[in-house]
Amino acid sequence: MTGGDENKKENVATEKKTSQYHLSANDNLGNIITQVQLKGENYEEWARAMRTTLWAKKKFAFIDGSVKQPPDNSSEQEYWWTVNSMLVSWIINTIKPTLRSTITYMEITKELLDDIKERFSVGNGPHIQQLKFELAECKQHWQNVVNYYGNIKMILEEFGKYEQYPTCRCGGCKCNIGTEVDKRREEERLHQFLMGLDDSIYGMTRSNILSSEPLSSLNRAYAMIIQEERVRSIACGKEQRSEPMEFFVQATSSSKGLMEPRDKGLPCPICKRDGHVA
């Protein structure tokens, strides 16, 4: 190995360490790194927002334990404490003030997050049960398709975070299990969406979608239902516009019949004379 290759590897390692300890000029103790505020019952939402933000800032390694506290005699000790203290401050800033005073203050980021998780995180079982109940109850009813789709898509995405599907562990599997699992998940979501539609309006379109081979994707099925809704909306608009016209024609015809003069050969019912109407 040449000296140039060794220098490149050393530079890469140095840059990696530097990026972990890097703080920009905009990073300060008062930053609020996520708009999701921990209120207690929304721990899962808050934890996801924190993970996403810390990944984006290249500081997640301080949480998962990848970056450990250096020894006291290490040259990295000062850098580590600087970043760690900044992260602790950012975490505290995202906690509701009334809740903040009840949380035990800890100087180490990982220990602080572990303590918050132990206190506010609940088992996934009850939450999964609640999501399944919401899926079963999610129906279109009086909503338009756009609103119904948005509601069920939100529940499906939340439920997807807790779904557990089999994965290949041997490393040499050639059965393409990942693709099969994704296909099965897409089909389940499609069925959930179609089951909640108004049967009296979209029953025929739903049957056409389910009879297609292969099954349409969820997005494709949504596009087909939206198209059907627009066609029905246009037809309904035409019917509403034609009803006043039909009433006008009928009323005009009735009035015309009343205004037509009587046969001059018939006597007036009042004066009994011919040649005029009453």
Image: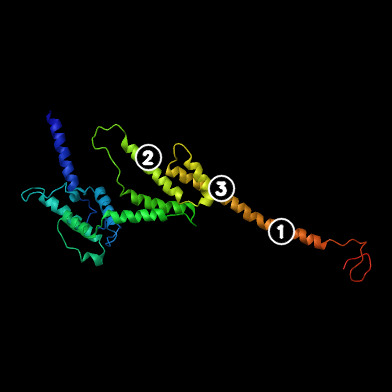
Q: Quadrant of the N terminus?
A: top left
Q: Read off the residue under disc 2.
A: 183
Kind of residue at disc 2: Lys
* Residue 31 or residue 201, whichever sits in front: 201
Residue count near mark 3 (Cα–Cα under 10 Å), binned few <14, some 14–19, many ≥20: few
Q: Read off the residue under disc 1.
A: 248
User: Which secondary structure lies at badge 1?
Assistant: helix
Distance in Å between CA atoms under marks 3 and 2: 30 Å
Task: Write the residue at 43% across / 44% down.
Answer: 218
Say which label, 1 or 3, has the lower sequence index. 3
Task: Write the residue at 37% across / 50% down.
Answer: 156
- Residue 159 spot, x, y in % from top left: 34, 51
Kind of residue at disc 3: Val
Q: Quadrant of the C terminus?
A: bottom right
Kind of residue at disc 1: Phe
Q: Read off the residue under disc 3.
A: 231
Residue count near mark 1 (Cα–Cα under 10 Å), binned few <14, some 14–19, many ≥20: few
Q: Do we see residue 89 in this rendering?
A: no
* Residue 26 or residue 158, whichever sits in front: 158
Say which label, 3 or 2, has the lower sequence index. 2
Task: Write the residue at 78% across / 62% down.
Answer: 255
Task: Write the residue at 66% across / 54% down.
Answer: 242
User: Which secondary structure lies at badge 3?
Assistant: helix
Distance in Å between CA atoms under marks 1 and 3: 27 Å
Distance in Å between CA atoms under marks 2 and 1: 56 Å
